[in-house]
Amino acid sequence: MRISDIEAMDFEELWRLHEELTRVLAEKIVAEKRELEKRLAQLVGGEAGGDAAPARKYPKVVPKYRNPASPDETWSGRGKRPKWLVKALAAGHTLDEFKIDAGGSERP
């Protein structure tokens, strides 16, 4: 359809064309949205908001360092250093002082 064809149409024909275009576009938008949601669910690994399994695909990392002042505070040696360790290192302590041996207790 050319622009000159549209300009030659009367009001009623243009309005019907408008309604038909609106309906078709709405259907296509809904279909496209469904397709995108399906692809997103595949990328995420399940339905968003569902009871999906945890995303962790590697084993839990065992702590390698422990705060002697508060034994429940540990650090695996990965990621950002915890505040207690940063303060202790700034005070002159060494990282080896906080190592946990294979048995789970601190080194003497």
Image (spheres, rainbow, N blue to C red):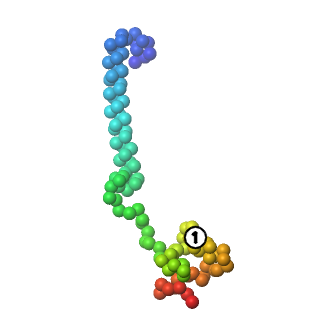
The answer to whether residue 8 is above or below residue 27 is: above
Q: Nearer the viewer, residue 20 or 80?
A: 80
Which quadrant of the structure image shows residue 33? top left
Residue 3, position in %: x, y?
A: 44, 15
The answer to whether residue 72 is above or below residue 14 is: below
Given the current orientation, which residue lies at the most extreme bottom position? 108
Q: Residues within 10 Å of mark 1 (few under 14, many from 20)?
A: few
Residue 11, position in %: x, y?
A: 36, 12
Q: Nearer the viewer, residue 74 or 58?
A: 74
Q: Secondary structure at mark 1?
A: helix
The quadrant of the rendering that contains the N terminus is: top left
Give the residue at x 35% y 25%. Answer: 21
Residue where numbered disc 1 is placed:
83
Given the current orientation, which residue lies at the most extreme front position? 69
Left or right of 95: which side holds 7?
left
Which quadrant of the structure image shows residue 60? bottom left
Labels in figure, total: 1
Left or right of 5: which side holds 64?
right
Residue 92, position in %: x, y?
A: 67, 79
Give the residue at x 32% y 23%. Answer: 20
The three-letter code of the residue at mark 1 reads Lys
Which quadrant of the structure image shows residue 69? bottom right
Left or right of 75: which side holds 39?
left
Q: Nearer the viewer, residue 6 or 56?
A: 56
Residue 47, position in %: x, y?
A: 34, 53
Give the residue at x 36% y 21%. Answer: 18
The answer to whether residue 86 is above or below residue 52 is: below
The quadrant of the rendering that contains the C terminus is: bottom right
The answer to whether residue 21 is above or below residue 33 is: above
